Image: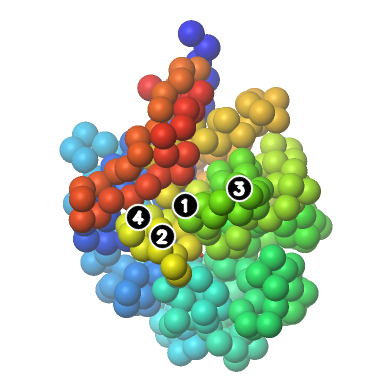
Amino acid sequence: MKTLTITRPDDWHIHVRNGALLKTVLPHTAKQFARAIIMPNLKPPVTTVAQALNYRDEILQAVPVGMDFTPLMTLYLTGTTSEADIKLAAESDAVVAYKLYPAGATTNSDAGVANIKAIYPALSALEKYNLPLLIHGEVTDEHSDIFDRERLFIETHLNDIVKNFPALRIVFEHVTTSEAVQFVSASANTIAATITPQHLLFNRNALLAGGIRPHYYCLPILKREQHRLALVAAATSGNPKFFLGTDSAPHVSSLKETACGCAGCYSAHAAIELYAEAFERADALDKLEGFASFYGADFYRLPRNTTTVTLEKQSWVVPSAYGDADHSITPLKAGETLSWKLR
Ligand code: NCD
Ligand code: ZN
């Protein structure tokens, strides 16, 4: 049987929620990944070190016995985050970054930042204390076309942020456009990006052609094929600025299969297998290890993992749902066949 052994990967962007959903989804991530950057967009958002420590405890309790998994916590940047808050975060071993959501950009972003210029003092403090800033890069003005919102964010905000804070390490999260790939590639080494499996595997037809498929609806939204191709080229290039971040974002199926469904694809059940599929299609399986296991750790200045995982070339059918009747989640590629399986 064909196998692929790589250094154990990390997931540099994930939503694991809390309560019952957390218990359903966390084992999928802990099985595959040694570490993951935990997004803070709970209700209410995780804004203080104390909240992050509580949330980390809840996550650690959901790790199945015998599995080794480290959650890396982030704090939610708001219009009132102070330099003192940032100093405390920098001093905490548990917190590794701040997350910037433009207010209204995505799920649970109401507490996000309404006026980006107004938080420049906080960005200056992040730069000073050497804490990375993770950005959901989409403009939020209601008149901007949803397919243009990432590109417009670069022009409207990101160029200025990068110019004003040259030493600030920034992860442009879940990039989805050729413009974002170009921006990151052309920037200094302080700027990196994560790429999701769905944006490598699908274009917007998966969401909209032949019927509307809510389980392919995430933000930033799937784009045209030309953008998918640019993302595949970036992910498989060996450029260390681009690394794995699933943005796995579970919602119970009833909240997605409805007149106004939530944004977020659930991919943690088969994350590394989905990436392997995308890399194999690009004839670049030899580039998977750098993308999945090395470049993110290097960017965050954390040690690379020392154990390995093995994938087998073996078909398996993704279950139609995970969780129980009250918390049923429809995974990406539900009911479809994948060609790689984690041993
Ligand atoms: C995420 C979620 O559901 O929390 N949704 C998504 O579509 N990606 C939020 C986010 O990362 O935008
Ligand atoms: Zn996300």
Q: Bin the neighbour count of mark 1 within 10 Å (Cα to Cα): few under 14, some 14-19, many 20 and up.
A: many
Colour convention of the picture: rainbow
Q: What residue is shown at x 68% (from left), y 60% (from top)?
A: 191
Label 2, label 1: how far apart the Cα atoms are = 7 Å
Label 4, label 3: how far apart the Cα atoms are = 20 Å
Residue on which disc 4 sits:
253
Confirm or deny contact between disc 2 and disc 4 (CB under 8 A).
yes
Front tag of 1 and 3: 3
Label at residue 215:
1
Specify the quadrant of the image occupied by residue 238: top right
Rendering coords of residue 143 (x, y %): 68, 82
Q: Bin the neighbour count of mark 4 within 10 Å (Cα to Cα): few under 14, some 14-19, many 20 and up.
A: many
Confirm or deny contact between disc 2 and disc 1 (CB under 8 A).
yes
Query: Considering the numbered disc 4 on the image, is that residue within a helix, a strand or a loop?
Result: helix
Residue on which disc 3 sits:
210
Rendering coords of residue 319 (x, y %): 35, 35
For this view, does 153 lie left or right of residue 80?
right
Query: Considering the numbered disc 1 on the image, is that residue within a helix, a strand or a loop?
Result: helix
Of 333 and 121, the residue lying toward us: 333
Confirm or deny contact between disc 1 and disc 4 (CB under 8 A).
no
For this view, does 245 lie left or right of residue 254?
right
Q: Amino acid at mark 3?
A: Gly
